[in-house]
Image (cartoon, grey):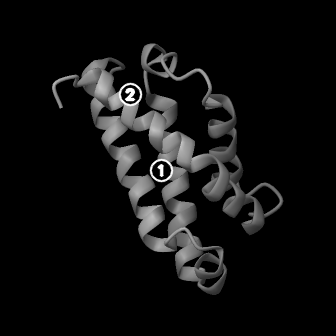
Amino acid sequence: MNPGPEADRVLLAHMRDCLDRIVEYTHAERARFDASRLVQDAVIRNLQTLAESSQRLSSEIKSTEPQIPWRELAGFRNVIVHGYLGVDLGAVWLVVEQDLPALSVAVKRMAARLDPQR
């Protein structure tokens, strides 16, 4: 997919879906995350997919949300995919709890910029 507004629309929709799934799986509760390896695996998979999609967004759309640490998001994806020193579930939960709410809001704003009539 070539970078540009249409690709960005698709990628942002994909990112929003991943964010929604993570909330659905965890109900934003650490205990729910900790209690189930199935939930942990699902969250990690969606974080991986989310980060991969974020890497493919155009520079133009990412520049509209400079407070999002885009490079760190890509780096987190590499840790998850390549399993450097194993996956730290505590670190995964911190990302879910502390970073995803702001990312979710940013994704919604970026999507609205691309489709102002919605």
Q: Does the residue at mark 1 contact the one at mark 2 (Cβ under 8 Å)? A: no
Give whichever of 95, 77 is nearer the camera. 95
Q: Secondary structure at mark 1?
A: helix
Amino acid, disc 1: Thr
C-alpha span from label 1 to label 2: 18 Å
- Residue 61 lies left or right of residue 67; in this view the side is left
**Quadrant of the snapshot with the C terminus:** top left
Q: Quadrant of residue 102?
A: top right
Q: What is the crowding at mark 1: few (fewer than 14 residues within 10 Å), some, or many (at least 20)?
A: some
Question: Circle 2 is placed at which residue position?
Answer: 110
In the picture as drawn, the residue positioned furthest to the left comes out as 117
Name the residue located 56 percent from the left edge and 49 percent from the top edge: 100
**Quadrant of the snapshot with the N terminus:** top left
Name the residue located 52 percent from the left edge and 16 percent from the top edge: 63
Coordinates of residue 51 in the picture (x, y in percent): 54, 43
Question: Against 96, is 30 above or below?
Answer: below
Coordinates of residue 46 in the picture (x, y in percent): 48, 58
Q: Specify whether residue 13 is in view.
A: yes
Question: Circle 1 is placed at which residue position?
Answer: 49
Q: Secondary structure at mark 2?
A: helix
